Amino acid sequence: MTHKERIFVTGAAGFIGAALCQRLLADGHTVLGIDSLNDYYDPNLKAARLVNLSEHSEQQNFTFAKIDLTDAVALNTTVRDFAPTIMVHLAAQAGVRYSLQNPHSYVQSNLVGHFNILELCRSIQSDSPDQLKHLLYASSSSVYGGNTKVPFSEADKVDNAYSLYAATKASNELMTNSYSHLFGIPASGLRFFTVYGPWGRPDMSPMLFAERILKGEPVRLFNKGDLWRDFTYVADIVEAIVRLMPAVPSREQEKPAHDVYNLGNQNPVQLFEYVDLLGEALGKEPVLDLAEWPPTEVYKTYADTSKLQAKVGWAPETSLKDGLSQFAAWYVPWYESQHG
């Protein structure tokens, strides 16, 4: 994007959100970021990500507010005052297996929170029809659930969710489609495929596995290592979002101005190979614990990115080996700083 925008980002202290804010600020945009800073995982990591953004606060092109998405009043007041031209809604209760322990948090954050974002867009659209150009929001490859046809295409059905998390993300897409149809909100859903990289989430496999490898503890691999994931480097995810921002969907006859895109690497890797590459990047041989296949897990995720490629002329391409090297270069110093 060459035009400077006023961009509102939810989940700004999160893994993808913080990386996106860094890129947007480096590109000269003005950013309002919000986050609830909850304790689903170590708040110190979220605070450290915000410290990286603090220099931009001093330059007055980054503002941060601690807001929970379920607080519609605070959300509306803060965002309406900011007057965004683009919204990127990334905040959500993340994690597949955690939904078995705390399902209520998924309903509140992912359903009520997403509804509040849509209502905010509707309000802005009603009062200032030309202000908000584009809503981009996080969906997930989890929406494909039990689909066995690979690669996963945006045209595939997504009515066979394997987890409550997946069900909330599929619901977000349906909710957005209806609001786009009813109120003309231009929106794009982003189906992320297993995002990894520096400053990642400690509940995801790169940090979980890396800590175990460095400690010499067994790394548990579900289905005895025979699961496949389409690992996507975080900088590629950010690049895709930035390229999609000006690619605003248009209304066509009965079709709302709403689209969804796979954001994946189109190159699934078996968990055995993934752990070997991670061990290589860390310089230590992994010890494996081969476990059974839990009901929340799908066998393979595999993104067809031809739609993204056709829209913006680019698709994620960072190799897993290169991406894990970048992750390890960040993770080892971070691990040492946290463990003395």
Image: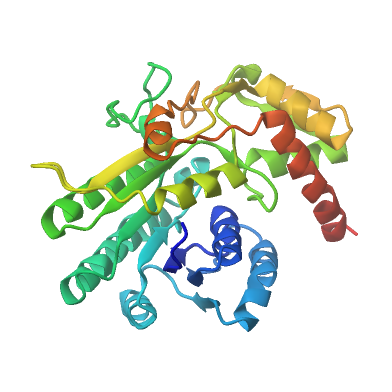
Residue at x 70% of width, y 49% of height: 198
Q: Measured from the top left, where is residue 189 in percent x and y?
A: 35, 46
Q: Quadrant of residue 215?
A: top right
Q: Measured from the top left, where is residue 269 in percent x and y?
A: 61, 22
Given residues 3 and 196, the one toward you in this image is: 3
Q: Quadrant of the C terminus?
A: bottom right
Given residues 227 and 309, the one toward you in this image is: 309
Q: Quadrant of residue 13?
A: bottom right
Question: Is residue 290 in sight in this rendering?
Answer: no
**Residue extending farthest left:** 253
Q: Measured from the top left, where is residue 309 in percent x and y?
A: 43, 32
Residue at x 65% of width, y 23% of height: 271
> On the picture, is 35 further left or further right than 128?
right
Q: Is residue 73 above or below residue 254?
A: below
Q: Is residue 246 above or below residue 230?
A: below
Residue at x 56% of width, y 53% of height: 16
Given residues 190 and 145, the one toward you in this image is: 190
Looking at the rendered structure, the number of numbered marks drawn on it comes to 0
**Residue extending farthest front:** 2
> On the picture, is 340 further left or further right than 93?
right
Q: Quadrant of residue 123?
A: bottom left
Q: Measured from the top left, where is residue 62 in percent x and y?
A: 55, 75
Question: Is residue 116 in sight in this rendering?
Answer: yes
Residue at x 35% of width, y 77% of height: 83
